[in-house]
Image (cartoon, rainbow, N blue to C red):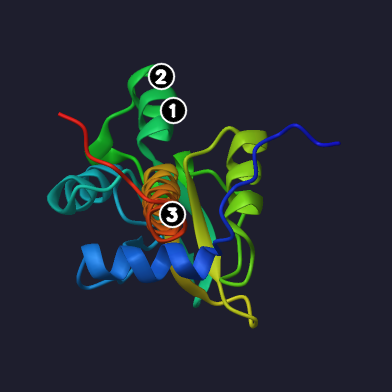
Amino acid sequence: MDDEPAIPNSSVEDVLEAKGALHDPTTVLTAAPQDSVYDCIDRMAEIGVGSIVVTADGAIAGIFTERDHMRKMALEGRAPRDTAVQTVMTEDVATVTPAQSLEDALDRMRDLQCRHLPVVDADGQLSGIISMRDCMRQLSEAAKSKALQLIEYMEEEYVVRQYG
């Protein structure tokens, strides 16, 4: 018997839908490979996100994150205004599809030690991005919903007496 707790039955699409209700518009922040790191960081800070997807000719070329900035810029003493993002971005970008389960996405983030996953459609085109925070928010909401369902069930099935 598997003793590991089950993750609520949610998909990446559910995460994107919930995120859409929280952040409008839900467009993905993107940059061109030749954009400066400074411009990328400025845009990330402006809207409060921790990553920017680098695209070239309509395809994902890489992803630049706060972690990339810390490790490949700050620690190496590079100048953000003089460094093209393609120089320091992560090129081997893991992605997920909307149909994938939330559990798959979280497992992938854990295994790759990353906090952001671009979402691609069936044609491999960028359609969104999810973060570890988005996934945790989805799990939290699913757990609250399940708890409320159980409370309702218990109140319908059993007489609940108020003491005090």
Whether residue 93 appears in this view of the structure is no
Whether residue 74 appears in this view of the structure is yes
In this picture, is 82 found above or below 36? above
Which part of the image, by quadrant, shows the N terminus? top right
Dot 1 and dot 3 residues touching (CB under 8 Å) = no
In this picture, is 32 found above or below 123? above
- Residue 117 location (% of width, % of height): 51, 53
In which image quadrant can residue 45 be found? top left
Residue 140 relative to residue 81: left or right: right
Mark 2 neighbour density, 10 Å: few (under 14) some (14–19) many (20 or more): few
Q: Which residue is drawn at the image coordinates 37% and 27% (left, top)?
A: 73
Q: Which mark is residue 102?
A: none
Which part of the image, by quadrant, shows the C terminus? top left
Q: Which residue is drawn at the image coordinates 41% and 53% (left, top)?
A: 138
Q: Which amino acid does the dot numbered 3 rest on?
A: Ala
Q: Which residue is mark 2?
A: 76
Question: Which of 144 and 163 lies nearest the eye of the viewer?
Answer: 163
Q: Secondary structure at mark 2?
A: loop
- Residue 17 location (% of width, % of height): 38, 71
Q: Earlier in the sequence, mark 1 or mark 3?
A: 1
Distance of mark 1 from mark 3, alpha carbons?
37 Å
Residue 134 relative to residue 105: left or right: left
Q: Which mark is residue 72?
A: 1
Dot 1 and dot 2 residues touching (CB under 8 Å) = yes
- Residue 112 location (% of width, % of height): 64, 37
Distance of mark 2 from mark 3, alpha carbons?
42 Å
Mark 1 neighbour density, 10 Å: few (under 14) some (14–19) many (20 or more): some
Q: Which residue is mark 3?
A: 142
Distance of mark 1 from mark 2, alpha carbons?
6 Å
Q: Secondary structure at mark 1?
A: helix
Q: Earlier in the sequence, mark 2 or mark 3?
A: 2
